[in-house]
Image: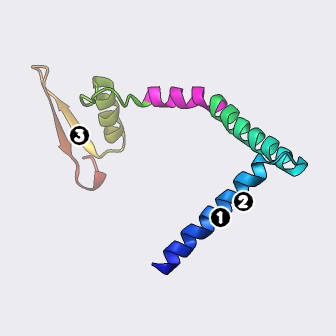
Amino acid sequence: MKIKKKRQKELSNFKEKIEDFLDSDSIPANATKFLLMIVALGGVVMGGAALPGILKILKSLNLSEEKTGFNKKQISNALGSLKRQKLIEIEKYEDDMSSTHFVRHGLCD
């Protein structure tokens, strides 16, 4: 308890010293205020410059829309890739149906 109270007292004394320093009209205080304003302005400018890129990235992520699954192109690309790697076999039948089989160890017969 004593340590916490002592720490709080030190922080309040430090805060008072900083406020007194910045409220004074001395040259070092004015230079410090100027530098703090430049640093704050630099952060705002950098944020403003990065904001269009961030907005574009967030828009491309489609966070607000619900995902309904994969579209036909994505499924076709995935199956084609697995077929090229000889991990699956795709059999097509006359009645516009197809069957997919996993191949043992990626070896097609």
Element on which disc 2 rests: helix
Residue 42 percent across, percent down from the top left: 73, 37
Asked if marks 1 and 2 touch (Cβ < 8 Å), the reply is yes
Residue that numbered label 1 is attached to: 13
Identify the mark at residue 89; answer none if there is no mark: 3
Circle 3 or circle 2, nearest the eye: 2
Three-letter code, disc 3: Glu
Whether residue 9 is situated above or below residue 99 in the rendered picture: below
Residue 13 belongs to magenta span? no
Whether residue 23 is situated above or below residue 5 in the rendered picture: above
Element on which disc 3 rests: strand
| Disc 2 crowd, CA 10 A, few/some/many (<14, 14-19, 20+) | few
| Residue drawn at (70%, 52%) of the image | 19
| Disc 1 crowd, CA 10 A, few/some/many (<14, 14-19, 20+) | few
Q: Earlier in the sequence, mark 3 or mark 2?
A: 2
Element on which disc 1 rests: helix
Three-letter code, disc 2: Lys
Circle 1 or circle 3, nearest the eye: 1
Residue that numbered label 2 is attached to: 17
Three-letter code, disc 1: Asn
Cα–Cα span, label 1 and label 2: 6 Å
Whether residue 33 is situated above or below residue 92 in the rendered picture: below
Highlighted range, magenta: 49-60
Give the total number of marks visible in the rendering.
Answer: 3
**The one of 22 and 34 positioned closer to us in this rendering:** 22
- Describe residue 27's horizontal placement relative to residue 101 as left or right: right
Which of the 4 image quarters holds residue 13? bottom right
**The one of 13 and 40 positioned closer to us in this rendering:** 13
The image's colour scheme reads: rainbow
Cα–Cα span, label 3 and label 2: 77 Å
Asked if marks 3 and 2 touch (Cβ < 8 Å), the reply is no
